[in-house]
Structure formats: C-alpha cells, structure tokens
Amino acid sequence: MSEEPTLKKQKRQTPLILSASTRATAINWKDPEDTSREFSSSIEPWIKLAKLAESGKFHSIFFIDHLSWFDVYGSSHESSARTGINVSRIDPTAALSALSLVTDNIGFGVTVSSVSEHPYHFARRLSSLDILTNGRVGWNIVASYLPSVGPSLLNGEPLPEHDERYNKTQEFTDAVYSLLLSSWRDDALVYDKINKIYANPDAIRPIDHKGQYYNIQAPHITEPTRQRFPLIIQAGSSPRGKLFAAENAELIYIHNTAKTHDDIADIRHAAQKYFGRDPSSLKFIISVTVYVDKTHEDALKQEQLVKDLQDEESAFVYFGGKSNIDVKPFEYDEPITFKGKVNGVSETADNLTNSDKSKPNNSKRQLYETQLRKKSKYVGTASEVADLLEEAIKETGADGLNFQQTSFPSGLEQIVELLIPELQKRGLAQTEYTSQKGTFRENFFGNKGQTFVSKDHPVHDLRWESGVSKEEFEERLSKTIEIRNERRKTALETLEK
C-alpha cells in the first residue's frame, strides 16, 4: 500500500498497552477446570474477568465478537455446534453497564459490525454505552467476513465482496461520526428549570447524510457523551483494511506474524502521507498466547494440555470461518486449492499458501499440524515469558499486547499473579491508571484530560464545539468533509494502482 513499507520504527509507548481478550468459549473449554462456557449463560464470569483484569492494571478488555455461525466447514452449522467454535454467543455490549459498576478504570473495547444494524440505531446504542460506563467504551469497527451473515442479516443476499464491505463500513462509520459529533453542540443541553428549557434547539441540527447505502436527515437523539466519541479501534489486515485503519483508528489490533513490523510501518506511513496524522498517535497491540507458571516445566504442561484437548474438526471449523475456505471435501494429504481471492480474512488464507513447504502439499494435515497446533512462542516462567514478550515488542514495533484466552479463569489469573508483576518490575506494565475513574481515552494514551481524538485526527473538526453558531459550524464542516473526501480519494486511487 505504501511506498515505504519499512518506515522507521516509531518510539513505543512505555509502559505497554495491555489488553485481555474474550472468546465465546476458551480454546481449552474441554478442560474440566475451564469455566468459559459460563460467559454464554451468566454475568458472573464477565464480572470476574473485569475485576481480574483491572487488578492487573490492564488498559482494556477486548471483546471479540462474531454475528453468526462458523458454518463454512461442511457448509453447515453442525460442526460448529459440536465443537463449540463461536457458539453460543451473547451480545457483549449487554454486559458493559454491569461491568462498569464493579470496576473504576478499565476500558471496554467492544466489537460491533457495520452490518449488524442501521447507523442511526447503532449511534444511539454507542452513545448510551459511553454514557452508562462514564466514558470507558471503545468501538472496534469491523466489516464482517462470515458468509453466514448473508442468510441471517442480509435478507438472504450473499455477503458483499471484501473491498465493497469496507466501502459500506466507511459510510456506516461516517454516519455515526456525524450523529455523535455534528448533530449536538457541546453545550446544547441546557437543563434550565427556571426558564423551562431542556435543550437549546438552535444547538441541535439534523445531519445531512446522503450516501450509497444510507440516507439520514435527522438529529441524533442522545446528548453528547463524556468522550464525545468512543476510542476508535480497528483490526483489519488486508490492504483495504490497513487503509481504513490509517484514516480512522487510534488503536489497531494486529496478529503477530513475520510481517507484523512491516504492516505496522505501512499503516503508520499511510496515516501520515494520506491523512496528515502523526504516525506515533496510532497505537498497535499484537496478539499473544502465553503459558506462564512458577517453573518452566509446569508452563510446558499447560501448553501440552491445550494441545491434547484440541481436535482436527475444531481446527478446520475455525479455519473455514476465518478464511471462507471449506477444507472438508479434501483428503487428509490432498493439496488444498482455491481459485481467486477469498472473501474472508485474507491473512488466514495467506498463512495456508505461505506455510511450511517441507510439509506435504499445503494439506489438511499441514494445516492442522503447522498452523493450528503450532508451538506457542511464549512459554515459561514469568521472567522467561517477559524476555520473549519484550523481544516481540522490539521486533514488531508494537505498543502493547492483547492476551488471548486459553483457559478461564486460570490462564488470566496466572498472567495477573505471575507475569504482570514481572512486567511492572521492568517498567513494561503500568502500576496504576493515569486517570482514576477517567475515560478509556485518557488511560489509554496516559494523558489525563485527553477525552477526545487528537487534533490531527480526520474527525477532530467534525465536532460542533460550544458557542459556535450553526452557520459557522456548517461552513467549517463543509470544508472538513471536502478535504476528507479528497484525501480518501487519493489514498484509494493509490491503493488500486
């Protein structure tokens, strides 16, 4: 995407940004001691997760979510049901209000797809979440990739092609920006009991969104929130996804692969070149799975237990859901072939085609043995794992870590009890939150008082600030959108070349 994919490493933030991810069920749900199944049936494990992560001074909980079944493998939901891959699921946003009551500082990065609902409805939900959590919400913007979204949410129409999904997602996001930032002036809510004025009608305007997918000519129905807009998160790895991140994201979740450093440099370069952003203002967290214990041998036993409880069907269901490639028709050692671009996560398919050539023919055997049962990089005592994580940060140029759940609660408990103190001792993990009872953005950037996006962010001037007349704001808004559209056009044209 960029002309300089090896852009000079940005100075990383110290301490590291730490996030704990969630899953529908943990990888190791078959372990008799694992209780992750209860995430789908009770609020209690969510509360335990939030309290535990906050006790470790994590910046956030990263709520992973998918809208529908992983039903590519065998063209059916049956294997997903049998293996427990991506099922069952509750809406994670439903838990946030409860979690905000039992915690004070940790942020909640919640995944919500642009195909899940109309942007006007979602804007109200997003504002509501930010209000009820007192400004501790981030929105992980995703375009969805599961083909089962078509029958379940798109009236039976097929899932749009990859780049078209991003076009729709950008328009969806633009509409939400307008509703939260450009409809109510900061001081629109008056609440004047003496003069009997609740809100100043001259400080509330309908947005004027006329796009390919949505037409919204109405004011937002919810008052401005403490953050004005939640922390903006993104997790795309394709060229189009990286361009979307370069324009929009404050936090990017990225898989830890051999090309992570170049991907990070690529996004930072694009952010600066096309959108005028300070590349160091984009923060990256890499995915890590750790097995940490008091002795190296005990950590190895943890890892081996997870491997022993994995099965091939689970691996193939997961791969199919991520890549949109059904490997069921292939024999075990038959080469897996597919034509053209996949309509799922391109990185997942790339891992198959670029995998270990010493194994037979990119087959199901190779997929299972080298891709989905591969040895974890981060196994050992707290000191050993900290060494490995520190090296990973140096190699990738990332700003933090997103810890994947293997078993719950034991996996996170050992990270908090053993690994976090070691990272804190090295200055790699915070010992306290920057802003007590602060917003997600304040604690994320380590800057008390930064409740809104930085001045160089493309949406900064979409905000209708106090005291600015409607006429003055709309004149400025028109220029801001014109500049944004021109920059976006240039970036897309360059990408297409």
Image (cartoon, helix red, strand yellow):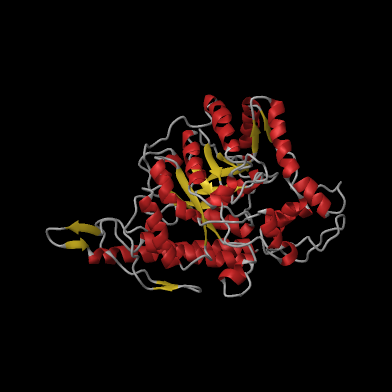
Is 331 or 208 nearer to us in this picture?
331
**Quadrant occupied by the N terminus:** bottom right
Can see residue 92?
Answer: yes
Is 463 drawn above or below residue 49 in the view shown?
A: below
Is 135 or 356 nearer to us in this picture?
135
Residue at figure coordinates x 81%, y 64% from the top left: 329
**10 on left or right of 369:** left
Query: Residue 272, image x and y in percent?
Result: 52, 50
Query: Residue 477, image x and y in percent?
Result: 36, 63
Is 494 or 194 nearer to us in this picture?
194
Where residue 79 sits, quadrant-wise, is: bottom right
Query: Residue 190, image x and y in percent?
Result: 21, 58
Residue at figure coordinates x 48%, y 65% from the top left: 172
Can see residue 456?
Answer: no
Q: How many marks?
A: 0
Is 105 drawn above or below residue 360 in the view shown?
A: above
Is 477 or 118 nearer to us in this picture?
118
Is 398 drawn above or below residue 274 in the view shown?
A: above
**Quadrant occupied by the C terminus:** bottom right
Which residue reaches farthest left? 194
Residue at figure coordinates x 63%, y 54% from the top left: 237
**358 on left or right of 10:** right
Query: Residue 148, image x and y in percent?
Result: 63, 66
Where residue 218 sits, quadrant-wise, is: bottom left
